[in-house]
Amino acid sequence: MSHPFDIEPVILRRKPTKDEEIKKGNIQTIKKPTNVNKQNTQSTDMRKIENEEVQLMKSTHDMSLAIQNKRKELNLTQKEANDKCQLPPNTINKYENMTAIVDQNELTKINKSLNLKLKKPKAVLIQ
């Protein structure tokens, strides 16, 4: 006859971790290709720039003169031209001094604001 307070033991087991399953051989691991994550891959152009295979183009003398002449024609200072073009401080200065690395977005803003038709110079491939 069983006693009302007799309790049968219950054994609780935790689920094995992945490492334990791998060690037992229940799970096989497969290496994923390294180029699966497209988010962290660099474009070919960036690799060429980092490896100094491509030289970025700075503003040209013709570009500098065109911006300078148009700015003077409109009686604007460099700061006023920056504000009119909605560019960061000293951007017009850098273009006029031929130290700016030409950015298509900046060039478009300059063209629209100052009514110019400047084109971005091509990057040169170094071999």
Image (cartoon, helix red, strand yellow):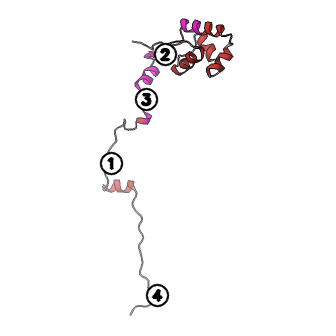
Say whether marks 4 and 2 touch (CB < 8 Å). Answer: no
Residue type, mark 4 in image? Phe
Q: Position of residue 98 (x, y in %)?
A: 57, 10
Q: Earlier in the sequence, mark 1 or mark 2?
A: 1
Residue denoted by label 4? 5
Q: Residues within 10 Å of mark 1 (few under 14, many from 20)?
A: few
Amino acid type, callout 1: Thr
Tag 4's secondary structure?
loop
Side of 32 relative to 101 (left or right): left
Secondary structure beneath dot 3 equals loop
Disc 3 marks which amino acid?
Answer: Gln
Position of residue 20 measured from the top left corner of the image (x, y, whole percent): 37, 56
Mark 2 or mark 3: name the one nearer the start of the chain: 3
Pointer 1: what residue?
29
Label 1 to label 4: alpha-carbon separation: 49 Å
Q: Which residue is mark 2?
A: 56
